[in-house]
C-alpha cells in the first residue's frame, strides 16, 4: 500500500518535467499526456493523478517550485500548473470549541458502521442530526432535505491568488447537500484512519461546487445562503469514530482565495443502548 502514493508523486513529477520541456509558457497539459506518462510510470489511475486533496500526497518539489494543479475542463480534458502554492490548500486545525470533543449518542441502524467511506460518514452525520446541530444549532430539526451526491459540469472564470482561471465543461462532484429554509449546506467529505494524514484540504474541492450553487441561485434571483462545510471523518483507537465539521466562507464568491474558517466542531459518535437491547442481554 505504501507504493501507490510514491508512484503518484513520481507520476506528478514526470508530468511537471514534461510541461517544463514542452509547454513552459502556458504550463498546460491534457489527458493524452497524462495517460502516456502515467502508463510509463506504472500508475494505472490516470484520472486520479491530477487530483491531490491534501499536501502530504504532493511531491516536495511542488512546494519548493511554488506550483499547484488546476483542472480546466475542455475536451480533451486540460490541466494547468499555477504559481502561488499557498493559495491552493487550507489548514484543518483541531477544533477549539469548549465542548470538543462532543460525544454524540445514537442508536445504530442495520446499515450504519458498515464501512469507512465518505458516504457512510455523511449518512451518519445527516441521519443522526449532526448537520442539523452544526448548521442550525438544533438537533431536533426534521424539516431538512438531503440531496445525494451528484456530478455536474461548470463553465466560469475564477481567481485564485494572483491567477485568473477559466474552466469550460469541467466536471465537478458534489458530495452532499442539505437544504433548509433559505439555506443550503454544501459538504465535501473525506475519511481517514488518522487525522494527521489530512492536515489541510484542496480549496478548489469546496470552492468549485460552492461557486456552481452561487451562480445558479444568482441566475434564479433566489436569496439563499450557501454555507460550505468540510467534513472530516476519522477512526481513532482511543475514542472510536468521529467527524470534524469545518464551516468556511469565501468573502468574494468570484475568488477561490481567500477562504476563511468560520467555526468547527468535533463530534465523537457513541452507540446508545436501547432499553430493549439491555433487556435482551443474558
Image: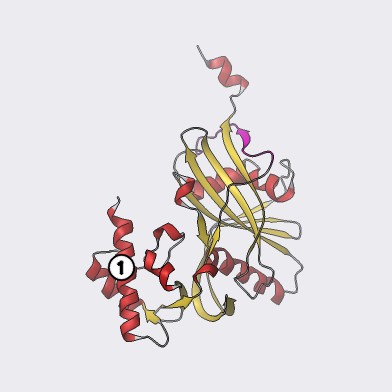
The percent coordinates of residue 100 (x first, y second) are 64, 39
| Residue found at x 41% / y 73% | 65
Looking at the image, is 68 positioned above or below residue 264? Answer: below
The percent coordinates of residue 180 (x first, y second) are 72, 55
Q: Is residue 61 magenta?
A: no
Looking at the image, is 32 positioned above or below residue 51? Answer: below
Question: Please, which residue is most extreme toward the bottom here?
Answer: 25
Which colour style is shown?
Answer: secondary structure
Q: Is residue 108 magenta?
A: yes
Towards the viewer: 186 or 83? 83
| Residue found at x 54% / y 35% | 109
Task: Name the quadrant containing residue 188.
Answer: bottom right
Report the magenta stretch's main SS.
Answer: loop
Describe residue 48's horizontal placement relative to residue 219 as left or right. Answer: left
Task: Name the quadrant containing residue 62.
Answer: bottom left
Instruction: Label 1: state its secondary structure.
Output: helix
Towards the viewer: 282 or 66? 66
Neighbor class of circle 1 (other Cα within 10 Å; few <14, some 14-19, many 20+) is many
Looking at the image, is 141 positioned above or below residue 46? Answer: above
User: Magenta region: which residues?
Assistant: 98-112
Towards the viewer: 230 or 75? 230
| Residue found at x 62% / y 66% | 210
| Residue found at x 60% / y 28% | 272
Q: Which residue is mark 1?
A: 11
Looking at the image, is 193 positioned above or below residue 69? Answer: above
Describe residue 68's horizontal placement relative to residue 154 as left or right. Answer: left
Question: Please, which residue is most extreme toward the top here?
Answer: 282
Task: Name the quadrant containing residue 45.
Answer: bottom left
The percent coordinates of residue 34 (x first, y second) are 32, 74
The percent coordinates of residue 51 (x first, y second) are 42, 66
Describe residue 160's horizontal placement relative to residue 27 as left or right. Answer: right
Amino acid at each position: 500500500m505504501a507504493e501507490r502514493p510514491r508512484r503518484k508523486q513520481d507520476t506528478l513529477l514526470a508530468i511537471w518535467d514534461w510541461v517544463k520541456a514542452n509547454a513552459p509558457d502556458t504550463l498546460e497539459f491534457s489527458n493524452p499526456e497524462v495517460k502516456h506518462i502515467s502508463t510509463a510510470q506504472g500508475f494505472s489511475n490516470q484520472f486520479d493523478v491530477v487530483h491531490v486533496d491534501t499536501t502530504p500526497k504532493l511531491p516536495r518539489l511542488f512546494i519548493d517550485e511554488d506550483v499547484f494543479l488546476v483542472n480546466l475542463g475542455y475536451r480533451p480534458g486540460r490541466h494547468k500548473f499555477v504559481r502561488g502554492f499557498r493559495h491552493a490548500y487550507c489548514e484543518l486545525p483541531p477544533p477549539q470549541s469548549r465542548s470538543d470533543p462532543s460525544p454524540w449518542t445514537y442508536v445504530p441502524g442495520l446499515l450504519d458502521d458498515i464501512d469507512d467511506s465518505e458516504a457512510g460518514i455523511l449518512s451518519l452525520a445527516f441521519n443522526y442530526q449532526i448537520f442539523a446541530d452544526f448548521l442550525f444549532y438544533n438537533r431536533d430539526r426534521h424539516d431538512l432535505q438531503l440531496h445525494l451526491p451528484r456530478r455536474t459540469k461548470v463553465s466560469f472564470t475564477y481567481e485564485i491568488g494572483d491567477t485568473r482561471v477559466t474552466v469550460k465543461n469541467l466536471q465537478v462532484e458534489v458530495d452532499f447537500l442539505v437544504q433548509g429554509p433559505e439555506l443550503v449546506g454544501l459538504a465535501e467529505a473525506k475519511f481517514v484512519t488518522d487525522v494527521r494524514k489530512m492536515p489541510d484540504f484542496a480549496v478548489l474541492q469546496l470552492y468549485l461546487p460552492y461557486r456552481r450553487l452561487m451562480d445558479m441561485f444568482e441566475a434564479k434571483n433566489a436569496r439563499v445562503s450557501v454555507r460550505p462545510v468540510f467534513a472530516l471523518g476519522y477512526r481513532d483507537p482511543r475514542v472510536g469514530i468521529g467527524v470534524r465539521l469545518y464551516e468556511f466562507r469565501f468573502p468574494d464568491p468570484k475568488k477561490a482565495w481567500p477562504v476563511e474558517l468560520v467555526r468547527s466542531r468535533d463530534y465523537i459518535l457513541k452507540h446508545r443502548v436501547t432499553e430493549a437491547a439491555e433487556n435482551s442481554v443474558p
